[in-house]
Image: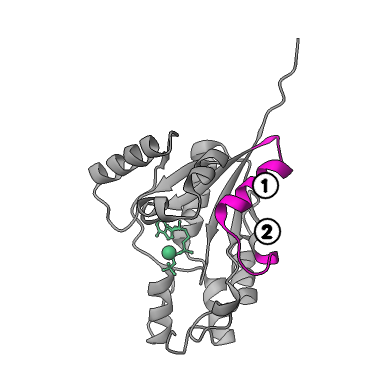
Amino acid sequence: MEQTKKRFKAGIMGGTFDPIHIGHLVLGERAHHQFGLDKVFYMPAGNPPHKQNRKGRATDEQRVEMVKRAIASNPHFALSLVEMNADGYSYTYRTLERLRAQYPDTDFYFIMGADSLADFHEWKEPQRIADAANIVVATRNQMDPVRFEELLEQQSERFHTEFLRLDTPNLDISSKNIRAMVRNGISPRYYIQDVILDYITENGIYLGEEE
Ligand code: ATP
Ligand code: MG
């Protein structure tokens, strides 16, 4: 009997991770379970040259270091630096097409929040993203559940593919909010892991006014 080789399932969690918070981690973990992903790759986006070393923000190196520390204890999470090594910036469609060419036996699951799905058609080459990966979407910003389903359907029709719903509770947490808490001397404890809070404190990140 012919053996059909099981295809590898890779989740991709892309983001700025400035800093990585428990929302990002919950999404990866839930996607791993719901879709049987073999690995979830956390893929920090490189900042374009004109956005390097902005005041009130972490450097690329610090963002990568925080991701590393955040995922260290999870055996099915991994770090991907493919968007960091390019000249600082890469479009998602290019990254996914490259990965597809490089790993033909892998199915890719690109994970995003509903805010990203809402403006997905404004991304660079969205059709090529939709063709290159399954897209898995988690609710965000208290989106009404009916509205969320409609949005999934709308975008599925528009891009002739099925956008998949990731079953997560609404997690009211964003990096922007965490940066503001640190800047204002409010503890972001439990929104981010202790190791990340320690790293931020030790390195004095997010203290200055954001540019
Ligand atoms: P910022 O406030 O700086 O935009 P963020 O919290 O949105 O940061 P990003 O790095 O921009 O984090 O997000 C990466 C991806 O994770 C995006 O697709 C975003 O929609 C998703 N995401 C981030 N936080 C959440 C959350 N709390 N619930 C659902 N999705 C989230
Ligand atoms: Mg965001």
Residue where numbered disc 1 is placed: 99
Residue sticking out furthest to the top: 1
Q: In the picture shown, does residue 1 fall above or below 34?
A: above
Instruction: Looking at the image, tell me whether mark 2 or mark 1 is earlier in sequence order.
Output: 2
Rendering quarter of residue 87: bottom right
Rendering quarter of residue 184: bottom left
Give coordinates of residue 121: x percent, y percent.
40, 50
- Distance (Cα) linking label 2 and label 1: 9 Å
| Near-viewer residue (130 or 67) | 130
Rendered residue at 38%/39% (across/down): 158
Label 2: state its secondary structure: helix
Horizontal arrangement in the rendering, residue 36 relative to residue 187 (left or right): right
The answer to whether the residue bearing label 1 lies less than 8 angstroms from the nearest atom of ligand 1 is: no
The amino acid pointed to by label 1 is: Leu
- On the rendered image, what quadrant is the N terminus found in? top right
Q: In the picture shown, does residue 159 fall above or below 172?
A: above
* Label at residue 21: none
Give coordinates of residue 14: x percent, y percent.
54, 57
Q: Does 82 lie within the magenta span? A: no
Image: magenta residue range: 84-106
Mark 2 touches mark 1? (CB < 8 Å): yes
Label count reads 2
Horizontal arrangement in the rendering, residue 33 relative to residue 100 (left or right): left
Q: How is the image coloured?
A: one colour
Rendered residue at 54%/87% (across/down): 204
Q: In the picture shown, does residue 41 fall above or below 177?
A: above
Q: Is residue 40 visible from the viewing direction of this image?
A: no
The answer to whether the residue bearing label 2 lies less than 8 angstroms from the nearest atom of ligand 1 is: no
Give coordinates of residue 134: x percent, y percent.
52, 39
The amino acid pointed to by label 2 is: Val
Residue where numbered disc 2 is placed: 82
Give coordinates of residue 197: x percent, y percent.
52, 76
